[in-house]
Each structure stands twice: as C-alpha cells, then as structure tokens.
Image: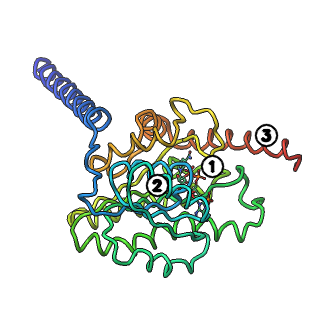
C-alpha cells in the first residue's frame, strides 16, 4: 500500500521537475532568440517605401526616425514644431540620403487628421510608429492637477486619440498589401496603475490593450502590431540627463527594441527593462507595486513642490 503511494509521489515529483525544467529551457531559449539573436532584419523597405513616426523631433521618436532612415526608409515625420521637424529632416537626408516629408500638427487637437490624411495620400507605408505622448509635469493627485479639464482632454488626445486615428489612416493600405508594421509606444506605467500619474498610466494601458486586441484582429492579414512598454529612458520627458544601464539613451533603447519586432506582440523592448517588467508583474504582488509607486511619486511630488515653493 505504502509502496503504491510512494511510487505515485515519485511520479508526480518527476513529472513536476521535468515540466519545470522544460519551462525553464523554453524561457531560456526564447530569451536567447529575442535578446541575443533578435529579428533585426525584419524592418526594411521591403515592407513599404515609407516609415511614419509621430513625435519624431525628440527622444524616442527621433531615435526611431534615425534608425529607420538608416535602414533606408523614406521618412514622414509628424510633430508639433516645424523648425525642429526641418532640422531632423535635413539631418536624415544628409546622413542617410533618404527622402523626407514633414507635417507640423498639435496632437492635442482633434481636427488635425484631414491634414495628416492629405500628407499621407499616395504613400506606400511599411512602418508606422505611434510614438507621440505626453506625461505629467510632476506627479500629482488627480484633483490637484493644474488646469485639470484641459489636461485631461490634451492627454487623451495626444496619448490615445493619436494612436487610434493614425492607425485608421495607415492600416487600410497595409491590409490591402498584406504587409506592414505598427509600433505603438505605450509605457511600463501601463502595466499596472501608477498613482499620482494615474491619467498617464491609464492612457498607456489603453495603448497596450488597443495594440494587443488589434494584433489579434490583423495578425492573419500579415500585419505586425506591437505594444512597446519602456521603463525609464533618458529623454526630455523624464528629465534624466545621465543615462545608466536601466535608464538607457533613446538610441540604445530603440536599437534593442527593433530586434524584438515580430518576436513579441508585447515587449518592454530592452533586456534590463524586460527583467524589471518580469519582477514587477510576476514576482512582486500588484498591491505592493502600487504601494511603492505611490510612495516614490509622493516623494517626487514633495521634492518638486518644495523646489517650486508651491506647498
Ligand atoms: N522617456 C521615457 O522614459 C518613456 C517611458 C515610457 C514610455 N515613453 C513614451 O515614449 C514616447 C516618447 O517619449 P519621449 O520621452 O521620447 O518624449 P519627448 O522626449 O518629450 O519627445 C516627445 C516628442 O513628441 C512631440 N510632441 C509632444 N507633444 C506633442 C503634441 N501635442 N503634438 C505634436 N507633437 C508633440 C515632441 O515635439 P516638440 O518638441 O515639438 O514638442 C517630441 O518630438 C511617449 O509616448 C512616452 O509616453 C517614454
């Protein structure tokens, strides 16, 4: 009798160990495929002559524009400030000998899409990077956000409406050609609620859900739609001046991110960020992540208000 129970336990133990070993092996192999081998060659003008990047004059968007131009795409740059657009366009033309076009629009407004549609008409678009996004000037309680009514509309228009509307304009032609890549820049703040950045965090959760839902709809039609969720990157938005391993330059971040396209529908885009993503979603309970987010942002808010003497 005891013998029988022992052998059952032995089998359960052996099977559990074998499945765990297989799971670890699978994770290691897919990690190696994504972070060591990568899929660097997928993004080429074979997808279509033009790449479109929103928020292309600074930070992460500018790095996408640089990297895609380096790969030979003609570049459509869409951002707010015409002079900055001209500077980036001239620099790309000079360095990579590619054609460029620019459109200056404020994504905080909703009446800009006919202008963008006209500028995009007739272009064979292989890649769309929905990058434009804004965050808080400093972490703040919802009801204390300065000019709250305007803040809500602007943030939703820039972070959410732009992604849906740009996709509406570009996806039909990708679908017709059965190829194309859309990269939607969400944020690690969209992986769980981030107190005192609540509106930002929620808009980024929208971008993540939108991307993953749309990828399921259009995958079989040959379109890749990827949700990109970076942690901190050293840009004007984060005011981080000294890049570190976990807060890389936008160039470094984008170079890593582009190797994951076609391998991950949802990605943190950069190995140290992937580790942070795993820690904060798998290892640490979500209530603890929210609690520490609140503490960190409360301290930042205090520092900001002390410096500004607004308290
Ligand atoms: N940096 C990070 O740590 C981080 C982390 C996670 C996610 N993200 C996301 O990554 C994206 C890029 O962030 P970033 O840090 O690179 O930002 P950034 O350095 O502030 O650059 C933002 C770009 O968007 C343009 N832009 C801003 N508001 C605009 C508007 N209303 N209309 C048109 N263009 C506008 C800016 O043009 P002007 O200079 O002319 O305003 C600039 O080209 C955002 O979606 C952000 O949420 C960033």
Residue that label 2 marks: 185
| Pointer 2 residue Cβ closer than 8 Å to ligand 1 | yes
Identified at 49% across, 57% down, the residue is: 131
Is 99 or 78 nearer to us in this picture? Answer: 99
Residue that label 1 marks: 237
Distance CA(mark 3)–CA(mark 2): 28 Å
Image spot of residue 12 (x, y percent): 18, 27
Residue 303, numbered label:
3
| 50 w.r.t. 111: above or below | above
Q: 28 left or right of 170?
A: left
Q: 112 left or right of 301?
A: left
Under circle 3, the secondary element is: helix
| Pointer 1 residue Cβ closer than 8 Å to ligand 1 | yes
Identified at 22% across, 26% down, the residue is: 21
Tag 3 and tag 2, C-beta contact below 8 Å = no
Identified at 57% across, 71% down, the residue is: 105
User: Badge 2: how crowded within 10 Å, few (<14), some, or many (20+)?
Assistant: many
């Amino acid at each position: 009798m005891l013998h029988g129970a022992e052998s059952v336990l032995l089998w359960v133990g052996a099977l559990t160990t074998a499945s765990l070993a297989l799971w670890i092996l699978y994770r290691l192999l897919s990690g190696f495929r994504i972070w060591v081998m990568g899929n660097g060659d997928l993004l080429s003008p074979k997808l279509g002559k033009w790449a479109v990047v929103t928020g292309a004059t600074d930070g992460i968007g500018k790095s996408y524009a640089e990297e895609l131009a380096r790969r030979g795409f003609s570049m459509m740059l869409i951002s707010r400030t015409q002079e900055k657009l001209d500077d980036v366009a001239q620099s790309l033309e000079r360095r990579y000998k590619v054609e460029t076009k620019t459109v200056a629009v404020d994504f905080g407004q909703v009446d800009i899409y006919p202008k963008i549609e006209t500028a995009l008409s007739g272009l064979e678009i292989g890649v769309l990077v929905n990058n434009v996004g804004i965050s808080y000037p400093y972490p703040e309680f919802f009801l204390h956000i300065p000019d709250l009514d305007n803040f809500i509309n602007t943030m939703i228009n820039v972070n959410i409406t732009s992604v849906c509307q740009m996709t509406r304009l570009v996806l039909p032609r990708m679908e017709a050609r059965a190829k194309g890549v859309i990269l939607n820049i969400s944020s690690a703040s969209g992986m769980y609620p981030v107190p005192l950045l609540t509106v930002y965090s929620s808009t980024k959760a929208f971008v993540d859900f939108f991307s993953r839902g749309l990828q399921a709809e259009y995958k079989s039609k040959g379109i890749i739609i990827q949700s990109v969720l970076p942690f901190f990157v050293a840009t004007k938005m984060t005011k981080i001046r000294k890049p570190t391993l976990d807060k890389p330059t936008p160039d470094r971040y984008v170079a890593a991110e582009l190797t994951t396209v076609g391998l991950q529908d949802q990605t943190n885009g950069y190995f140290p960020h992937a580790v942070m993503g795993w820690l904060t979603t798998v290892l640490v309970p979500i209530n603890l992540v929210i609690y520490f987010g609140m503490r960190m942002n409360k301290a930042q808010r205090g520092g900001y208000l002390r410096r500004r003497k607004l308290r």
